[in-house]
Structures are given as C-alpha cells and as structure tokens.
Amino acid sequence: MLGFRDDYDYVRALEVFQTADYTEMAISRAIGREEILRMATSDVPHVLRRTRESSRLNTLIRLYFLGLPVPVEAARSALAPVPLESWVEGELLCPPGSEDQVAPRVQIWPVNGLTLAVDLPWRRSTAPPPDFVVPPGVLTLELARAMIRRPCERVLDLGTGSGTLALLAAPYAGTVVATDKNERAIVFTRFNARLNQIGNVLCRVGDLFEPVAKQRFQLVLCNPPFVISPTQRYLFRDSGERGDVFCRRLVRSAVDYLEIGGFYQFTANIAQQVGRSWKSDLEEWFEGLGCDVLALVDRTDDVSDYALTWILSTESKEAALVSQLYENWMDYFERERIEAVSYLLITLRRSPGGPTWTQIDDPPCRIVGPCGDELVRFFECRDLFTANHVERLFNSRLRLAPEIRIEQEYTMTPGGLDVCNIRVKKTGGLQYPLNIHRNVTRLLAGCNGNQTLRQLLAEMADYLGVDWDRTVSVVLPAVRSLIERGVLLAVDPPKAEV
C-alpha cells in the first residue's frame, strides 16, 4: 500500500522536496523548459543532459519527474533523512536492482505549491491500464485557477483523481470530501493529503454522489470523464455513456447537493451536431434547475483533431493501431452526426429563487491566472445591476481595473490613419476577447473613480450631441458587460439589498 509506516516520514519526505527547491519554477530553470507539466517524451534526452551534474534537485528530477532509474547512492543522498528503505517499503521506489540503481514506482509533480504523487509516465506504445491515475491535465489546472476561493464549511471534489482540486480547496474549507470510484485514485489522494500535511480532506470510494448521499456543499468541483469517445476504456476519461449525455446528467444531479447560493464548477465537452445549435443544446442542460450559469468556451476542435488528440495521449502511438483507432472514432462521430467538440468551463450557482439566467461566452477565453474572485464578482454584478436596480449602476463611481490594457489598431484611409479596431486586454486572470467602440473608449478614459456613471453618460451625450435615452440604450449594456468582466470596478460599491 502506498505510504510510509512512520507518520513523521511524511513530514521529512515533504522537507526533502522543499529543501531541494523541487518547484515548478526551479525545475523549469533546470531543464530549460517553460511549461514543465506539458513536457513531451521527446524532451527526455534534453532533460537528461541538462541534469547530468550531481545535485539533490537533479537527482529528484531524474527520479521522480522523469520517472527514470538513478544510482542507489545518489537516491539515498537525495532522499535523506528518510531512509531509502522507507521509500521502498512505502511503494515509492522499487528495490535496488543488480545494476546498483533504484527506479521509482510513482511520479511526483510540483503543482501550484503542492507535491503530488501520480502514476509513472506512460512511454510505451500500448495503452495504460484502466485505473491509471493521471497527473493534473490542462483543464484540471484551468479549473484550479478558476476555483472560487472563499471561506466555506464544506467542499466536494467529485472524481478527485490525484486529489489536486481537493487539496487546493482545503485551505478555504472546514472539510473537503474527495470521492472517486477508482480505488487507486483514492489511495493516491490519501497519500498526497498526508504528504502535503493537509488534514481536512476526507477520501471516499464510490460512484458519483453515492458516498455523500443527502449531504450538501457550498462548493462542488468536478473534472469528470467527459471525453466523447466510441468506447469505455479509462476511468479518468470515459463515462460509458453516449455523447455528452453524462455531462448533462451530472449537472442535473449536482444541484441537489448544493446549498442555496452554492457553486458547482466543472469542465465538460459538448458535441456540435450537424444541423443543430450547440448553444441551444447546452442551454437545455440547465432548464428548470433554478440556477444561474456562466459557461466559458475554452476551445473548439473539429472531430479529426479531437480524435487524434485523445488517441495519441491515452491509447497508442503505434502507427498501425493509431490508424485503426482513428477510423473507429471517426465512424462513431459520423454515425452521431458530430462535426466538432467544444471544451467548456462552467460555473453554476444555485439560486435562492426568482428569475435565473444562462450566459454562454464564445469565442474562447483564456485563463492565465487565478480568477475565482472575478467569477464571483460576475454573479454579484448580475444580482446588483438588474433592471430593478439600474439606479445603483447610475450612482456608481467606476474606475478601470489596474491590470487592464487598451489596444488600438489603425488602418490607412484617404484622410490618414483611422482607428479600425479597439480591444480591451487583461494581463492576468480571465481574459476575454473584448472589442469595444471608440465612444466606449472615451467613457473608459473618464473612469477614475471621481465621477458617477450618470455624470459620465451625461458628458458623453453632450459630446455626441444625442439625447440621454439614446446614449443610455446604446452604452449602458456595454458598461454593464465591462463591469461583469472586471474591466471596470466600482469604488465603494453599493451593497445589494437582501
């Protein structure tokens, strides 16, 4: 069973990685690659050359980042003060071989301040076993950045995998419940919780919500097996249900486990079928649930790219087998009339009552930093600046957020250079592709926190020579959108009535 016999060895093992500076930044510098969690197998020779000098960090990179054997004495020195025998007994290392080398039994990744054990890299041409515990992928990390980080009593990480989301949520929660039907995943999550000295994560084996029947949470997180595939091969990838039916069913089940005002954040895939509106199909997921929904499109792949991505990353790289699998996937998509698949990040809030809304933001956005606060602000702004509270908006004093940049593009005309495109860009968090009109740019220039929106709109009406009602009808929706997206911030914002 994965884990140390002595509780104190967990403390000392974490110190091993901390004192070696086994972090994303330090590993990136050592191996000369910026995005270490997306490193290709073809980069292994390069990393081996970069880490050939003897040091604790280089040994740990070779052993637990690359997942390759190292000399016994080098491992003993790098892993001290925890005895080498304890790492072997805890199933973190294989027993030393006849060549005086020791090989790892797990991979250990530094992720967002955590030190996480997962299954070894799969470098064979054949597929890994069905219960393979994968490292956190791109969408898991995006969900982690989007996670709402505010104090709450109970959080649920549904389908926890290696425990990444559960452990990242732990500092903000009284209790985090991490569930997975893959028993091997729960073993890894328990180990990772102990290694990272996190004591408020409860691990439960079971399918979907079975382990938490009749319990409710302020936050539910889920990176489910959403891949739309012709077969059920992997627990971490495939739901075993047709198309995106599983994601839809999961949404409708999750609401019963949310407290009023609680959030459910999850990743999903939705099929774009020939002759159908995928946005209408997505809206049907949330009909009658009594929830407010913000769906962000991460990207959209045509089915050919989608199939090859998942075949090469999870099934095989052997040319003949890849060709056969590709045909199977493409036949399946043709039968189901699926022409593309969109990757989604969805934040859903259980409403206390009254009218609800669903907003689907497309084209794609980028999550380049923590943005949980931005998402909460989006929901709060929708509450605050409803049609019934438009006076609150008029009386707000607004300022441009400090991370905002405004870019202008010019084109040559007979009269000289003329602005053809104006974009609002953010330097961090959640990045929307926002184009704005030049008149809105003029209004933004006055958003320094000194004037109310009413005053700014009045000045704009006077400048444009149009009446107040016309100015409000055209400009106000754009201003509300910029507030919801964190481009404009209220100075001492008014509180919504309870």
Image (spheres, helix red, strand yellow):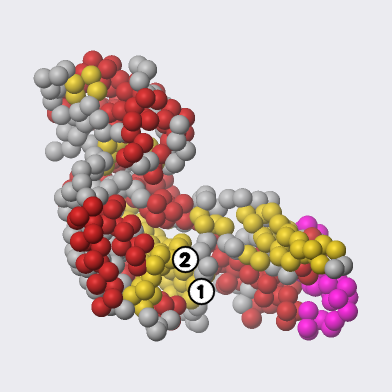
The residue pinned by badge 1 equals: 359
Q: Position of residue 23 (x, y in %)?
A: 42, 33
- The crowding category of the residue bearing disc 2, from other C-alpha atoms within 10 Å (few below 14, some 14 to 19, many at least 20), is many
**Disc 2 secondary structure class:** strand
Q: Position of residue 284 (x, y in %)?
A: 39, 81
The disc at residue 254 is none
Q: Position of residue 108 (x, y in %)?
A: 30, 36
Which comes before the other along the chain, label 1 or label 2?
2
Q: Position of residue 229 (x, y in %)?
A: 25, 66
The residue positioned 46% from the left and 62% from the top of the image is 298
| Amino acid of disc 1 | Gln
The residue pinned by badge 2 equals: 297
Q: Is residue 271 above or below residue 123?
A: below
**Quadrant the N terminus occupies:** top left
Q: Is residue 284 left or right of residue 242?
A: right
**Disc 1 secondary structure class:** strand
- Kindly report the secondary structure that dominates the magenta region of the rendered protein: helix
Whether 362 is among the magenta residues is: no
The residue positioned 36% from the left and 59% from the top of the image is 221
Q: CA distance from mark 1 to mark 2?
A: 11 Å
Contact (CB < 8 A) between labels 1 and 2? no
The residue positioned 79% from the left and 60% from the top of the image is 445
- Magenta part of the chain: 448-471
The residue positioned 13% from the left and 25% from the top of the image is 95
Among the 4 quarters of the image, the one containing residue 71: top left
Question: Is any atom of residue 445 visible in this view?
Answer: yes
